[in-house]
Amino acid sequence: MNKMIMNRKIMKKYIWGQYFTRGEIVRKVIDLILEFKKYDKNIKILEPAFGTGNFIRVLKEKGFKNIEGCEIDPRFTKTPQDFFLYPLEKKFDLIIGNPPFTKYNIKESYFYPKKYFQSPIHPRKYLPRKLLKKEKIRIENAFILKSIKHLKDKNSTIGFVLPASFFIEGKNLETKKVIAENFKTIIVYQNEGKMVDEPIPCVFAIFTNIKEFENKILLIYENNEKKVVKEVLDKEKLLTDEIIPKTYFYRKNNDLKGIPLSEFLLDKPVRYKKSFTKYNVSAANILAKTRIPPGENVSDYYLAVVRVGNASVGRAGLINIKKDILNDMFYVFAFKEKYNNNREIKEKICRILNENQEYFKNITIRVGSKSIKKRDILNFKIKI
Ligand SMILES: C[S@@+](CC[C@H](N)C(=O)[O-])C[C@H]1O[C@@H](n2cnc3c(N)ncnc32)[C@H](O)[C@@H]1O
């Protein structure tokens, strides 16, 4: 293929979020919905971004007859349709599929409300006011919010493959608020393998209303041996907690005991010397800095933890706040006053963190790259 056509194809893939759902996953998630809700074969179904038609194919195999779809790319359909221009009068019992996701560094992959201000379907009809005012929002949010307006009634259901990062605590709050207002039950399913052929950790989210799970979130995790674990949480946790099954169950099974590091560390930004070119401390050499050199002033030593990187995330060291220059790989924490001159505690925290690097690697499956949050470190518990 000529290079320009190839590049255009790759760009299109990212602009339109063309990551197709694996066949076995499509079957699995459709069965999952049917396990929780009995549907008549005549219900009205919408696949809002059907791509190669994976979901529609399996739904038809299962005997569903009344299926409509949208797809913007003329490569996949003779009648391309932008979902955001699809009439809101059309209502469905079930909206199912894998909407495009925004890739953070590709500006064309976002949804720009203004782009549709002159269209017959003004975004104010489906976006909450706060999002309407934004220049751009993640496209998966716009897909969810518009889909909600296409539902027939309170018993209708949305089932979407979403990036696991959607459910990170505090992210996508405006969309989560609308979800919480419109649905009594949220099911988040995740498996150990891949859902799409890209390194994006995904979940399958079902927003619906099930009597047995009223005002509840049901988390389901299935490993490669098909072993399934489930947990029911209160629905409010959608707005306050991270509800990604894999990280949730990992944390639960590795229930840390002891005192959270927030007891020892200050939860405040620290000013430290940073340089991309002239640093002397990096993720590669931080493990050589786990002790405070004899004769040095103990209070000058702060905790530095590597925040990203497949091999190095979670590595910890003690850096001299006056002398050391770090690159951009770290979170730096000051110790609380009462521990600031305590060499033993400082070195011990550092050692325990390094002994538990596996833990930090395991809780970083939310996004494609391995990265942790400051809170992960502050909530980490140790026995002193
Ligand atoms: C993640 S893919 C999923 C395709 C299919 N649902 C599946 O699971 O395999 C997203 C699809 O949405 C299409 N798409 C992107 N923006 C769209 C829009 N505004 N309206 C309709 N389809 C869109 C893309 O071309 C792509 O085929």
Image (tube, rainbow, N blue to C red):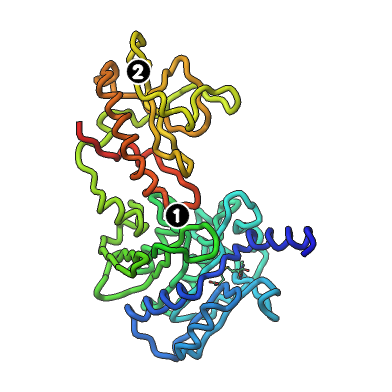
Q: CA distance from mark 2 to mark 1?
A: 37 Å
What residue is shown at x 67% (from left), y 79% (from top)? 77
Residue 33 numbered mark, or none? none
Task: Report if residue 17 is visible in the image.
Answer: yes
Residue of label 1: 165
Compared with 329, 249 (above or below) is below
Tell me residue 145's x, y (percent): 49, 65
Task: Report if residue 150 is visible in the image.
Answer: no
Q: Secondary structure at mark 2?
A: loop
Horizontal side of 177 relative to 2 (left or right) equals left
Specify the amino acid type for callout 1. Answer: Ser
What residue is shown at x 23% (from left), y 48% (from top)? 255
Crowding at dot 2, Cα within 10 Å, few <14 / some 14-19 / many 20+, comes out as many
Which quadrant is the C terminus positioned in? top left
Choose between 86 and 53: the one closer to the eye: 53
Compared with 349, 48 (above or below) is below
Tell me residue 380's x, y (percent): 29, 39
Crowding at dot 1, Cα within 10 Å, few <14 / some 14-19 / many 20+, comes out as many
Choose between 8 and 44: the one closer to the eye: 8
- Identify the mark nearer the N-term, 2 or 1: 1
Residue that protrudes farthest toward the top in the picture: 295
Which of discs 2 and 1 lies nearer the camera? The answer is 2
Residue of label 2: 292
Compared with 115, 58 (above or below) is below
Q: State the image quarter where residue 36 is shown.
A: bottom left
Compared with 338, 181 (above or below) is below
